[in-house]
Image (cartoon, rainbow, N blue to C red):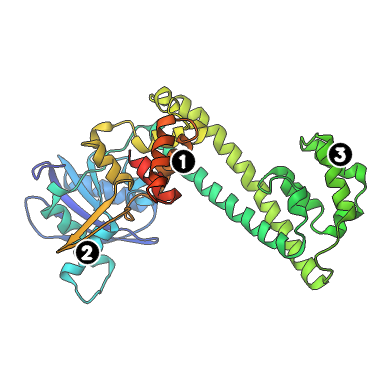
Amino acid sequence: METNDALVACVGLDWGDTHHAVQVQPVAGGPIEVRDLVQRPDVLQAWVAQLRQRFPEGRIGLAVEQRRGAVIHALMAYDFLVLYPINPKALARYRQAFHTSGAKDDPTDAGLLLDLLRKHRDQLRAWQPDTVVARTLQALCEQRRKLVNQRVALTNRITSLAKQYFPQALDWVGDVASVQGCDFWLKWPTLAAVQRARPATLRTFYHQHNCRTAAVIDARLAQIAAACPLTCDPAILEPLGLAVQQYAAQLRVVLAAVHAFDGRIAAVFATHPDHDLFASFPGAGAVCAPRLAAAFGTDRARWDSAAALQAHAGIAPVTERSGKQLWVHHRLACPKFVKQTFHEFADQSIRFSAWARAYYDQQRRRGNDHHAALRALAYK
């Protein structure tokens, strides 16, 4: 937390894709300067230079309704700016307290951000950037997860389409989310296409994709030869076959991208000061260990207790009490990627940790479903 005498000026900045509404006021008092900035690096740099010229000594607090993005990336380079990221929900509630009609515009929000910073600074936490390695690792892990989500989405689309016109292929491609699966769809999007291929061609295809078990290949070739089509309607075969080919081409690119991110994450994680600690966690592996390191960060002092991190991550339950009613539920307002990290690590840990497995089984015996048991384990 920052004290009230730590700053010489306060700034409220409501960011936008093309324009930013800005309000500036000295801590000592005085008129509020209202400005509108175009979202361009040179404009932001010129404005910051003018701000420093106006307040040459001391630090300047800046409240902004985001924790990352173009504005944060541009302003974090200036050591005299103390950034206060404001939760969008907190700003929305603050706005509702003064504008019950629900009216909203950028200059008003900039004024509210300025007001929050001036009057409630002792309740706000200034943003302290982590080390370059930690921030790089966090960004890499988050972008990789987005690619994994794309991989899952494309795999589900291909599977759904195949079931509508060519379900047998799901037994012949191996893993749909694999290079072999993508190449199979790209070469033979329909049953007629794969049945026209010579057995030697199919055998070579499987060998080139490291499928060398003779019994498996022979069984697939026999099934291909004897297979009957689900439908012969060209109005179904051509559109769905073409769609599967296009999704397979996209999936192949995503698979290569995930592989590239895996390599880069491993290289950056190897230089992290807590590499050995997080790599030792049972079940963390090459995926969860870097994500846990990114979630904890290198500055542990920002967490007053384990409960503070649990609440931030969303793995601590929320208790709502009103009169005689009591409701305990899992936390919804939290960083989704961090919560997902602990949830997935808990899932992996039950395969490698005896006590984690015992606790998970205990939760299931109490009637909790799989994900509720994992949330409880993540909390522990």
Q: Mark 1 points at which residue?
A: 347
CB atoms of marks 3 and 1 within 8 Å: no
The type of residue carrying mark 2 is Arg
Q: Estimate how packed mark 1 is, as few (under 14), some (14 to 19) or many (20 or more) residues with alpha carbons within 10 Å.
A: many
Mark closer to the chain start, 3 or 1: 3
Distance between mark 3 and mark 1 Cα atoms: 38 Å
Left or right of 306? Residue 173 is right
The type of residue carrying mark 1 is Asp
CB atoms of marks 2 and 1 within 8 Å: no
Left or right of 217? Residue 144 is left
Mark closer to the chain start, 2 or 1: 2
Q: Name the residue under label 2.
A: 93
Q: Is residue 208 shown above or below 35?
A: above
Give residue 199's position: percent from left, percent from top.
91, 45
Left or right of 11? Residue 170 is right
Q: Name the residue under label 3.
A: 204
Quadrant in the rendering for residue 298: top left
Local SS, label 3? helix
CB atoms of marks 2 and 3 within 8 Å: no
